[in-house]
Amino acid sequence: MSWPVEHEEPLRQTLIGTTLELPSSTPELMDALRHDRQALVRDALLWQRWVRYLALLATTVLALAFGSGDRLQLLQPIAVTALVYVLCVATTAEMVWRSDAVHEYRLPALLVTADIVTLATLIYISGRPSEMGRILVGALLVVQLSVFYFGRGLGTYAAMLAAFAYIVSTRVAPSSADLASQRLPHVLFTLGVFGLVSAVLVTAYGNFRARMNRLRLFCKLVEEGDLTPSFAPGDDKRPDDLTLLARSFEAMRSRLAEQIGTDPLTGCLNRRALETRLRVEWRQAKRRSSTVAVLCIDLDHFKLINDSRGHPFGDVVLQELAGIMKVTARDTDAVARLGGDEFVIVLPDTGWQGALTFAERLRRKVDDFDFGASAGAMRLTISVGVALARGTDPISPEMLLQEADRSLYKAKSGGRNRIFA
């Protein structure tokens, strides 16, 4: 049985790295990450309410102790402002407490707005126009917490809202007499310094958070049993402790993949690793509307070999057969041993012609090979079952593997040493 030779262009897969190109990402995985993120936002908002209460208490005490004007006159507006803020934070905390997950931006944006407005109000009530720069000093804490826990967008929003509150408090709200004392160059200089510090905070914490998200996604893949992608921490332009942590995770993933994903006799993937790899390739095929071919391979009359030559000789045969498969396969293909003498090869981005050409090439190589040459060489044959599916087909990876196994059964029933597709 022979098939026309088809030119097979090697497919180079991009592994997960700092660019975060994820061949194995799926809507289900992204939904799981989104749910985890929303749960984290929920927990962050719950514990941050105590930070907000303490910050309010400290600001209120400072406003009453060092504010301009009569303390008795300041007490009522400050108390009203603080009460409104406490009600806002407490109501939000109650809403968060009753929910399992929180939208990543809505409630955090509401609370950041309340933070800046309350801070600006307290400082405006208790201070002179020349002291309104205190708004920006206090806002730096809000910017830092916002960008670190909720991202660059909310951190930038907090900085812009604080700058707006400062401008309003110095250029719009004061009386004409006070306005003259707060010169425009001074305001612009203060805003420039605040903008510089805020930009550094947003950039530094934002980049750190983005890298943490990449590491979290990598860990999520490993958590779900996908050990095929690798993290490329060496690509970091500014290495730090997070880089060291990523390298440790990558080393742990590599060692774990060796221990639980490899058949110890042949060095091929084991069943668990095969199932994971097949799911990965199937997701890729669905994304690109391409094809995946699966070959089930069985040594003909392997039981007779074990019975007549012994199990050690049979192990040598399996090792040599695995070596032939690995040499024949491309770098992007996956060779796995399911158990006994049954092997599976996954061929991504391969059509019928390419799959059949590969199967015939493998069959011929096995047919021409002298197995166990050091202990008395013998010729062996294999039977191959081929199945193929497009990413648009309404089947699962498990169904594709079962179809290849049925084709293998037909190849063996038809006389062995042949290919059935």
Image (cartoon, grey):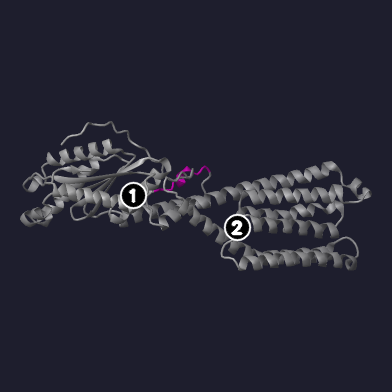
Q: Residue at x 85, y 47 (%)?
A: 171
- The residue range painted magenta reads 229-237
Contact between marks 1 and 2 (CB within 8 A): the answer is: no
Query: Is residue 141 visible to the viewer in this orientation of the structure?
Result: no
What's the mark number on residue 84? Answer: none
Mark 1, residue position: 278
Residue located at (34% from left, 39% from top)? 349
Question: Amino acid under label 1?
Answer: Leu
Judging by the rendered image, the residue that carries numbered circle 2 is 103
The x and y percentages for residue 416 are 13, 46
Name the side, left or right, on which 31 lies relative to 112: left
Q: Label 1, secondary structure: give it.
A: helix
Type of the residue with mark 2: His
Q: Position of residue 253 (x, y in %)?
A: 38, 54
Report crowding for label 2: few under 14, some 14 to 19, many 20 or more residues within 10 A (C-alpha).
some
| Residue 351 vertical position relative to residue 345 in the rendered view, above or below | above
Q: Quadrant of the N terminus?
A: top left
